[in-house]
Image (spheres, coloured by chain):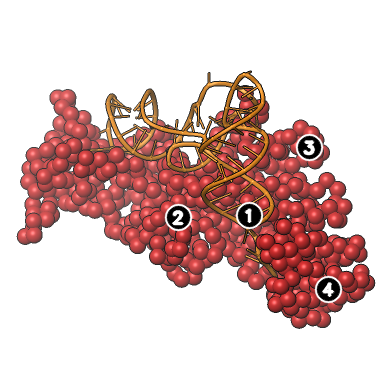
Chain colours: A red, B orange
Amino acid sequence: KRKFFYIMPETMGNTNNAPLDFIREIVAEDLRNNKHGGKIVTRFPPEPNGYLHIGHAKAICLDFGVAEENGGVCHLRMDDTNPTKENMEYVESIINDVKWLGFDPGDRIFFASDYFERMYECAVTLIKKNLAYVCDLTSDEWDEYRGNLNLPGRESPGRARSVEENLDLFTRMRNGEFEDGAMVLRARIDMSSPNIHMRDPVIYRIRRIHHFRHGDKWCVYPMYDYAHPLEDAFEGVTHSFCTLEFEIHRPLYDWVLQSLDWPNPPVQTEFSRLNLTNTVMSKRKLLQLVKEHRVSGWDDPRMPTVSGMRRRGIPAAAIRKLCKTVGITKFEALTDLALLEHCVREELNASAPRFLAVLDPLKVTITNYPAGGVEPLDAVNNPEDPSAGSRKLDFGPELYIERSDFMLEPVKGYFRLAPDREVRLRYGYFIKCEEAVTDAAGNVVELKCTYDPETRGGSAPDGRKVKGTIHWVSARAAVKAEARLYDRLFTVEQPGAGDADFLTELNPDSTRVIEALIEPALAELAPGSTVQFERNGYYCVDPDTKPGKPVFNRTVTLKDSWTGKQGK
RNA sequence: AACCCCAUGGUGUAACGGUAGCACAACUGGUUUUGGUCCAGUUAGUCUAGGUUCGAAUCCUGGUGGGGUUGCCA
């Protein structure tokens, strides 16, 4: 009985029909009413003062997605109206991340600061309409005049100024005749409004800051609440989506455009931001992690930034899938990190070629195999994708297996290797453990095994079965590699909740670096390549990789229904 | 405290006055040369009290709980 459907575009990863979220319903309704002449223009407006994170990705999927689905366009606009913390490095990273996520702004990359002259003219218009005035209250007076949530504000003496005087003062503000903070331009609205943003809000302030694009051309900068509706209007934006905390700003957004008699103005609609468990999303906190070297940088693979997730090996399609799955609502949800991991696994299961790598090696000697013998074995590259083909694995008498794939005294339900037990080596032979060699401390240091030559390739002609198949590398061919095992950045679901200092909730074991033994083909891969280490997890080749010294990042583990079952 | 917004299984989301469905997670079982994948199944939900209606997750009122707003940040 759903009224509307839309076809998911290619970038959203499928073509199934899906019910419309409330924002897409609004857009569909506007289209039906021909509200904007059948055109849809959206925008993604980040301030270039930090790197994009997965929360931004949700907004990007919405802004670009809605445009794409409706034959419209989406502008990428840098909201650079406060140059204090903005710079070109951030601009470049933002453009790069948006494109990597799979969206193409084309030539629609704009800068709010390019509209400063027009914004200034609009401010002059407001003054002429007696809808804006210059106010020179001191900061102490400000606190007193503003009122608070329960108390209405009081009108500034500046409210009484004549249009001529305001025009003169505003011109002189622009010309740099006054000190920073000496006066501001305010909108004349309602000092007794219960919405504090409507109590004659500041729309221009004097700030002598070097702008990264316009240098020292300006010493007055427009405030967000004034600038944003104008940016949208100037660009012909029809639908302006933003997060919930701007809900209370909407009356001001509308006031600005209405006061300028803007025809067919853009409409702001708010949705809830993305919250993920076991991480933080605020720019302030992310910046702090970087500045205090709690992480290696904005692109640390543990960071929820787009660049961090990219380096972690998370495919853009998985991020899009997550955003589609959590949907667009006004409910402030907390999404389980497990959902992201599921999206990542789903994507990578289909695409990542399989390889064998041993992360915690235990030596195995095949006592009945010809000494020095070498033998190529066929291995399938991806059982999910026949077109991925196969490769050769080098088998020999000396191998390494995973330490966790052997138990001296196997527990119930364990069906890997143990004394006198037989398992299959993946793509290889059945082997049987004849002897576990221990050191003085009783640690197992080597296994002496025999193999059954009849089981080459992994099946026994006599039809006998083994329950376990384990991965391995041959001692002769194996290459050493660094593996960086990443885990959640924080130990708690909501870092910083309550009175907690989020830094005390950092996971001390969020990175574990080990030396692994990998099959040689893995050492040939280019940085950025994504693979599966069979029976272990998905990994990608880190840019730190140097010739002869491969580095792998663990993107996510494989699901494991054994480890959790032990002890039951 | 004033104003605004929100409330569906453990988590996220659907329902547009007419059978509460899907996904994740958890748990069973089947298949399997990855304890992966895949397949089948189980557990589990409309915050609360009234009202309107033949019929309410849906509409109305009160309550409860959560969030936002009191930068010359965005």
Label located before the other in sequence (2 or 3):
3
The reply to whether the C-beta atoms of the residues labelled 2 and 1 are less than 8 Å apart is no
Q: What residue type is labelled 3?
A: Gly
Gap in angstroms between the C-alphas marked 2 and 1 = 19 Å
* Image location of residue A446, percent across then percent down: 12, 52
User: What is the chain letter for disc 1?
Assistant: A
The reply to whether the C-beta atoms of the residues labelled 2 and 4 are less than 8 Å apart is no
Q: In this view, does A141 lie to the left or right of A544?
A: right
Task: Tell me the quarter of the image containing the N terminus of chain A.
Answer: top right
Q: Nearer the viewer, mark 2 or mark 3?
A: 2
Q: What residue type is labelled 1?
A: Glu
User: Which mark identifies residue A499?
Assistant: none
Residue A157 vs A386, above or below: the answer is below
Label located before the other in sequence (4 or 3):
3
On whether disc 4 and disc 3 are found on a single subunit, the reply is yes
| Residue found at x 18% / y 39% | A414
Quadrant hosting residue B40: top left
* Image location of residue A176, percent across then percent down: 80, 79
Residue A222 visible, this angle: no
- Residue tagged by mark 2? A494
Secondary structure of the residue carrying numbered label 3 = loop
Residue A567 visible, this angle: yes
Q: What residue type is labelled 4?
A: Pro
- Residue tagged by mark 3? A38
| Disc 3 residue crowd, few under 14, some 14–19, many 20+, Cα 10 Å | few
Quadrant hosting residue A50: bottom right
User: Which mark identifies residue A157?
Assistant: 4
* Image location of residue A455, percent across then percent down: 18, 32
* Image location of residue A84, percent across then percent down: 65, 71
Q: Nearer the viewer, residue A109 or A425?
A: A109
